[in-house]
Every structure is written in C-alpha cells, then in structure tokens.
Amino acid sequence: MARRSVLLLVAALIALAGTAMIVLYVQGIDARATQDQELVEVLVATETIDTGESVSDAQEAGKIEKSEVRRADVVEGSLSSTSSISDLVAIGTIYPGEQLIAKKFGSLGDTQSLVIPDDKMAISVELTDFERVAGFVNPGNEVAVFATALDPVALLPDNQEQKLGSVTRIVLTRVPVLGVGTTSVTSRTVEGEEGATTEEVARTILTIAVTQDEAERLIQADRNTELNFALLTDDSKVENGPGATLGTIFPELFRGVRQ
C-alpha cells in the first residue's frame, strides 16, 4: 500500500512539473511575441537625402524625423539620435521611409570613394546637362551610352552637300553609375546668323563601372564622337543595333543615294 502511495505521489509530481514547464514555455513565447511587438523609436528619412548632404542640412530641411516601429522591424544599426553623426554627411542616397544607420554616413572624403564591382573598373566622362539627362542621373542608376559620329559629307542628287553619313548608335547598353562629380561651367563659341556668340555651358563628370572592352569603346567614342547618356529603369529595353542615320529619319530625301 505504501509503495502504491509513493508511485501515485511521484506521478503527481511529474504531472505537476510537466504542467509547470508547459506554462513557462507558453509564457516565454508570449514574452518574446510581446517583445517583438514593442515599439522602438528610430530616425527615418522623410525625403531623399542626397549623397554628400550633411546631417545638419538634412535636419534643417525637415528630411529627418523620429518614428516608432516594431522592435522586430528595427534595422540593425539604426539610430535613435543624430548625436553620433551630427558632423557627417550621407555617403550614399537615402530614400524616404528608410531608417538611418550609422554606416551610411561618413566624412566628406568618404563620399568620393567608389565601390567598384570586382570584375569592372571605373571610368569618368564629362558631359553637359543635356547629354546627361538634364541632371537626373545619380549614383546607383543605370545608363545606356549613345554616340553620334560625324562622317564626311556626301552629295544629294541636286548636288547639295549633306552630312549623309552621320550615324547615332548605342555604345554601351547598360552600365551602373558609380558617382556624379561637381558641376563646372565652361564657355563655348557658337556660330549663328548674326555671327559668333559665347554661351556658358554646365558640365559634370559622371563615373561609371565598365569592363576593359567597354572602357576602350567608351574612350574611343568620347574622343571622336558626341556622347549622350540615357537613364534606364529595370524594365527599359536596350539592345545593340545598326543605329540611325539621316537617311533613316528622312528616307524620302535620300532615295537613290548611296549611304
């Protein structure tokens, strides 16, 4: 009888311990779930913060504000205060809604260091605003590069000279932009009906990532043609082709003329 009582007591204790363990396990799950749902204060960008823009300028422009997010959604390294980055600048574009993290800020010199893909090299080209899509190209974008070659003149049937052989075609179908340099203003002389005039032209250096073959073609095109960059989206359709000549645009003017 005593032995049976002991066994019953042991069974009861085991059942009690098991129940306690289940209760503790469930409480742990609830605690972790509650912790993940806890709101944490972080800094977020309300507008685009451009590469090279200082933290103080971004704050004055109202581009940074505090926001509460679930702890589970907090990005590693996110900031709740600008005290540690107050004297720094953005080393890459920060987009609206993005949480601010320390590694995206550095000294002014850091903004000029390029992250070049392992299999490519960086090359720079100086372009006017018109040639670089009116200044809409920024680091991280992808562009296509077109070149217009000005060939010798040819004769139309009425013996009028025409640059029949000029051709525009794509040189690089899709390359990433690594950096956008500062803009400078240069002067150029333009011949018009009223004689020569001088105009101011804004020029900016764009740096892109290319392979050796792409670099050779781009340098050749830069030295001997007129370049234009086209800003691409992920869905832009770009392919190499024969290009376009004046005969392509105005076929009726060049019928019977050898191109």
Image (cartoon, rainbow, N blue to C red):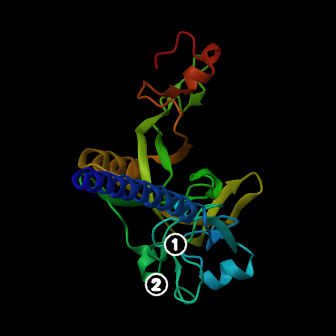
In the rendering, at what x and y percent does residue 88 appear? 52, 85
Look at discs 1 and 2 and give the one toward the viewer. Answer: 1
**Image quadrant in which you'd find residue 250:** top right
In the picture as drawn, the residue positioned furthest to the front comes out as: 1
In the picture, residue 44 is in which quadrant? bottom right
Residue 135 % position (x, y): 62, 58
Q: Is residue 178 left or right of residue 66?
A: left
Q: Residue furthest right?
A: 194
- Residue 133 in the image: state x and y as whole percent: 61, 50
Q: Is residue 230 left or right of residue 96?
A: left
Give the distance between the C-alpha atoms of the residues marked 1 and 2, in whole angstroms: 19 Å
State which tag comes first along the sequence, 1 or 2. 1
- Numbered disc 1: secondary structure: loop
Q: Which mark is residue 78?
A: 1
**Residue for badge 2:** 107
Q: Which mark is residue 30?
A: none
Residue 33 coordinates in the image, percent (x, y): 54, 58
Q: Which one is nearer the viewer's eye here, 159 or 49?
A: 49
The residue shown at (48%, 77%) is 102
